Amino acid sequence: MKIQTKDLAIIAIYSALYVVLSYISPIPIYGAIQFRIANVLLATIPLLGMAGVFGHTLGVFVVNMSSHLGPIDLLNTLPAFAMAFIVHYVYKHTKNDYTIIGTGIAYSAVLGATVGWMLSYTGNTGGATMLATMAYVTTANIIASVLIGWPVFKILKRSDVFEKLINRGEKYA
């Protein structure tokens, strides 16, 4: 992938938006009970291409830097990158809007498992079992990335805002 100025701008804007949406949330973004409204942005990755994948990864990394778990939470950047790439890749090769739902659920399950395991490993589950923590984190991610993210994706795609402003008439990445 050849990185262009446009891609760097998308990465910077996406990651900054992810960080801001995470930190302004009145709901905890760390711990056994968490909800990151910023995960709504996951559904926009197919419209942004690989720049969206990198922006998501950078946003997750920056937010996790201030986690109470310390450096171990930075490891969740790896599954976040892998699953964000899958969201992009599957959509790119199918051009099927419904893949956003399936890959959003897959992202949520993988991150729910890794976050739940890390919270359990570090003893930060708030008394909940590891499976309960995994289920809660997965559910919160599904709410953000699918139940809220899917309509956001459809509205933005229908409006052609990214195609007109970012892709200059080219079809989506």
Image: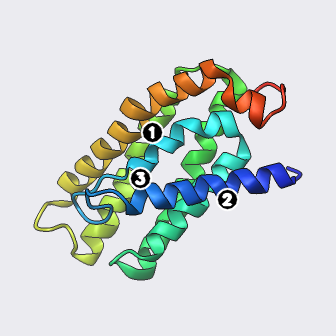
* Disc 3 residue type (three-letter): Leu
Q: Pinpoint residue 135: horizontal percent, then vertical percent.
A: 24, 47
Q: Pinpoint residue 60: horizontal percent, then vertical percent.
A: 51, 61
Q: Residues within 10 Å of mark 2 (few under 14, many from 20)?
A: some
Horizontal side of residue 29 vs 164, given as left or right: left
Q: Residues within 10 Å of mark 3 (few under 14, many from 20)?
A: many
Disc 3 designates what residue?
A: 111
* Disc 1 residue type (three-letter): Ala
Horizontal side of residue 158 vs 100, given as left or right: right
Disc 2 designates what residue?
A: 12
Residue at image position (33%, 78%) is 68
Q: Pinpoint residue 105: horizontal percent, then vertical percent.
A: 41, 36
Q: Pinpoint residue 40: horizontal percent, then vertical percent.
A: 45, 41
In the image, is residue 162 above or below residue 5?
above
* Residue found farthest to the bottom: 70
Q: Which one is in front, 70 or 63?
A: 63
Q: Which one is in front, 108 or 48?
A: 48
In the image, is residue 42 above or below residue 5?
above
Question: Which picture quadrant has residue 115?
Answer: bottom left
- Could you give the CA–CA distance between mark 3 and mark 1, rounded to whole angstroms? 9 Å
Disc 1 designates what residue?
A: 106
Q: Is any part of residue 99 visible from this angle?
A: no
Residue at image position (57%, 60%) is 16
The disc, 2 or 1, on the residue closer to the chain's N-terminal end is: 2
* Disc 2 residue type (three-letter): Ala
User: For the C terminus, which image quadrant?
Assistant: top right
Q: Residues within 10 Å of mark 1 (few under 14, many from 20)?
A: some
In the image, is residue 7 above or below residue 89?
below
